[in-house]
């Protein structure tokens, strides 16, 4: 059985929403070519294209309380810290449509994105015995969570 809190923060106040870091990159591509059948001494022609992309990296951390079966282990339960990352690349391009090394005077335009998500890592947090706080106290679970994070 798991117990989770709200979508925006968990019982320790840790943000459950991703914290992204984004890099924006813009490139200019220059193609130099000679027309098919052109003389060797003919001047090169030039066409320009652009490619822009954003790389975003997000880290997500969440904390859950997992109950233990009393037969399997000697304490009621403990906290598990889950961490994973998500990387998203979004790109836009506008480049000349070339056939071989010949310009067709058309443009190839588009946009797309792809996402890579890592496998979550789970860390079992130490559950220190807290005897000074009665279980009926309104903040007892929050105190246990903070103790599991070793913040006390």
Image (spheres, rainbow, N blue to C red):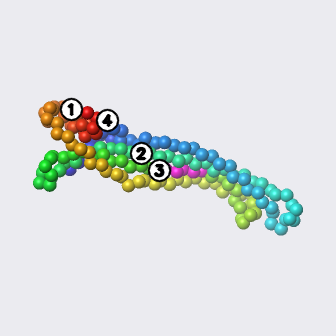
**10 Å crowding of disc 1: few (<14), some (14-19), many (20+):** few
Magenta residues: mostly which secondary structure? strand
Q: Is residue 123 left or right of residue 130?
A: right
Q: Is residue 60 left or right of residue 139?
A: right
Contact flag, marks 3 and 1 (Cβ < 8 Å): no
Instruction: Work out whether mark 1 precedes mark 4 in sequence or the reverse, and give the earlier one.
Output: 4
**Residue 139 has which mark?**
1
How far apart are the two marked residues, 2 and 4, measured between alpha carbons?
A: 16 Å
- Which residue is at a point 25% across and 40% down the rendered structure image? 148
| Residue 59 screen position, x and y as percent | 41, 45
| Residue 27 screen position, x and y as percent | 65, 48
How far apart are the two marked residues, 3 and 1, measured between alpha carbons?
A: 36 Å
**Residue 151 has which mark?**
none
Instruction: Work out whether mark 3 precedes mark 1 in sequence or the reverse, and give the earlier one.
Output: 3
Q: Verify whether residue 19 appears in magenta.
A: no
Instruction: Work out whether mark 3 precedes mark 4 in sequence or the reverse, and give the earlier one.
Output: 4
Question: Dot 4 corresponds to which residue?
Answer: 13
- Which residue is at a point 60% across and 54% down the rendered structure image? 110
How far apart are the two marked residues, 2 and 3, measured between alpha carbons?
A: 9 Å
Residue furthest to the bottom in view is 37
Q: Can residue 3 be seen in this view?
A: no
**10 Å crowding of disc 4: few (<14), some (14-19), many (20+):** some
> In the figure, residue 119 lies in which quadrant?
bottom left
Question: Dot 2 corresponds to which residue?
Answer: 59
**Residue 87 has which mark?**
3
Contact flag, marks 2 and 4 (Cβ < 8 Å): no
**10 Å crowding of disc 2: few (<14), some (14-19), many (20+):** some
Residue furthest to the left in view is 71
Magenta span covers which residues? 88-92
Kind of element beneath mark 4 = loop
Q: Verify whether residue 89 appears in magenta.
A: yes
Residue 122 vs 98, above or below: the answer is: above
């Amino acid at each position: 059985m798991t117990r989770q809190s709200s979508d925006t923060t968990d019982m320790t106040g840790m943000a459950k929403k991703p914290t992204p870091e984004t890099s924006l990159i813009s490139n200019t591509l220059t193609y130099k070519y000679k027309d098919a059948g052109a003389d060797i001494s003919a001047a090169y022609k030039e066409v320009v294209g652009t490619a822009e992309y954003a790389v975003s990296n997000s880290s997500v951390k969440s904390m859950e309380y997992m109950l233990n079966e009393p037969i399997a282990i000697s304490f009621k339960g403990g906290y598990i810290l889950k961490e994973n990352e998500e990387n998203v690349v979004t790109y836009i391009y506008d480049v000349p449509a070339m056939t071989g090394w010949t310009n067709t005077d058309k443009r190839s335009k588009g946009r797309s994105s792809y996402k890579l998500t890592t496998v979550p890592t789970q860390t079992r947090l130490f559950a220190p015995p807290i005897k000074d706080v009665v279980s009926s106290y309104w903040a007892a679970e929050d105190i246990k969570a903070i103790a599991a994070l070793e913040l006390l």
